[in-house]
Image (spheres, rainbow, N blue to C red):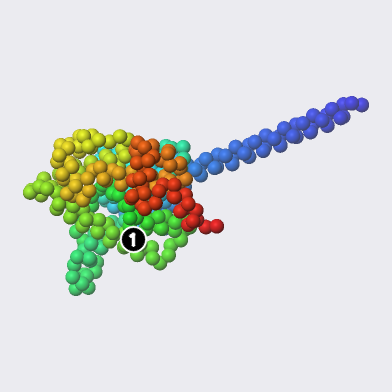
């Protein structure tokens, strides 16, 4: 008489166990899908475009990503959230939210992202000869363009270096393109955006040429070599800004004496190495504060030794204290 209730109880137990296992399996699947989504969220914009043949944007959010010695077309690398190290010609170049990297057509680069929190990048790749044709049209008489609008443009070599963009001239347009890429929108202004980007690259090229002309050296070859070493000094400060950096260490990295580094840096970039490093740290500090980090933590992470000096410099540079960042962000955020 008692066997039937026992069998029914065992059946219900097995049924509940099966349902529990199914629920656990479903949870595991959902977890795996979530992890895979966090590993890499690439968006190629426009869809179906080809590197080198089209102007395109690659927008991605990733925790892990590996590229080894890839020779892409002329491109601009930027980071929307976090920081990424690109390796170019044996140099590790750290790109953050206030900087971008220019790579020439065919220049190989590598990157190895393996971080706990996803980083977000946006890279613009130019169609081959697109920027060169823009430069040719901008510097040639109108009649030449009317006579031969499809004429071949001479090659143009850009400074494949790390560049700061504190005013957001190039970065703001890249971030706008990233938003469109995410929304999978291709407005009629897409090609115009790349035309404007190419004009901004040409303006940067002219600015760099003017800086090279200010290098205190008589021979052109000497000016170019000294400018190259000054760029190495800037990149070193950029990649090590959170550490204690001395003029001696920067000079050693650039293979220059302290005197020649300080003198040439000030003449070329219109500021001393210390002024450049301080401005760089303050820009990074503001980015971290916008992410709602604590002031004392940001102060230590950006290389400042005391909160009082950090607060004073921050107020002098931006016009408001670090503590106001959260209030400003809340005032501009939607309700």
* Residue 284 in view (yes/no): no
Furthest residue in direction right, as rendered: 1
Residue at 87% of width from left, 29% of height from top? Answer: 4
Residue at 52% of width from left, 57% of height from top? Answer: 334
Q: Is residue 322 above or below residue 45?
A: above
Furthest residue in direction left, as rendered: 218
Q: Which of these two is toward me, 307 or 220?
A: 307
Residue 129 placement (x, y as % from top left): 26, 58
Q: Quadrant of residue 238?
A: top left
Residue at 41% of width from left, 40% of height from top? Answer: 298
To which residue does mark 1 refer? 194
Residue 158 placement (x, y as % from top left): 23, 52
Q: Quadrant of residue 13?
A: top right
Picture quarter with the C terminus: bottom right
* Residue 281 in view (yes/no): yes
Q: Which of these two is toward me, 151 or 30?
A: 30
Residue 89 placement (x, y as % from top left): 25, 40
* 51 on left or right of 8: left
Q: Is residue 179 above or below residue 108?
A: below
Residue at 31% of width from left, 52% of height from top? Answer: 165
* 18 on left or right of 212: right
């Amino acid at each position: 008489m008692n066997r039937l209730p026992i069998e029914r109880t065992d059946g219900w137990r097995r049924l509940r166990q099966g349902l529990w296992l199914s629920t656990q399996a479903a949870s595991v699947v959902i977890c795996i899908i979530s992890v895979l989504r966090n590993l890499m969220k690439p968006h190629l914009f426009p869809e179906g475009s080809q590197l080198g043949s089209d102007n395109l944007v690659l927008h991605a959010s990733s925790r892990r990503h590996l590229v080894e010695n890839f020779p892409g077309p002329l491109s601009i690398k930027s980071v929307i959230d976090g920081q990424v190290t690109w390796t170019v010609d044996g140099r590790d170049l750290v790109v953050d939210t206030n900087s971008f990297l220019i790579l020439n057509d065919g220049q190989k680069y590598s990157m190895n992202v393996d971080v706990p929190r996803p980083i977000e990048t946006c890279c613009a790749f130019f169609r081959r000869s697109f920027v060169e044709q823009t430069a040719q049209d901008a510097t040639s008489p109108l009649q030449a363009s009317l006579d031969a609008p499809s004429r071949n443009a001479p090659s143009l070599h850009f400074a494949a270096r790390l560049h700061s963009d504190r005013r957001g001239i190039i970065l703001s347009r890249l971030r706008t393109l990233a938003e469109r890429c995410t929304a999978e929108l291709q407005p009629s202004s897409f090609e115009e955006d790349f035309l404007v980007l190419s004009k901004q690259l040409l303006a940067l090229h002219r600015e760099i040429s003017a800086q090279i002309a200010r290098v205190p050296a008589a021979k052109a070859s000497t000016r170019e070599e000294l400018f190259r070493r000054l760029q190495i000094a800037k990149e070193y400060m950029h990649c090590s800004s959170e550490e204690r950096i001395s003029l001696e260490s920067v000079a050693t990295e650039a293979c220059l004496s302290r005197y020649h580094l300080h003198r040439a840096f000030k003449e070329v970039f219109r500021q001393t190495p210390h002024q450049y490093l301080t401005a760089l740290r303050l820009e990074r500090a503001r980015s971290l504060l916008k992410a709602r980090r604590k002031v004392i933590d940001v102060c230590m992470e950006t290389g400042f030794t005391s909160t009082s000096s950090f607060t004073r410099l921050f107020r002098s540079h931006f016009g408001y204290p670090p503590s106001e960042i959260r209030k400003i962000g809340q005032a501009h955020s939607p309700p």
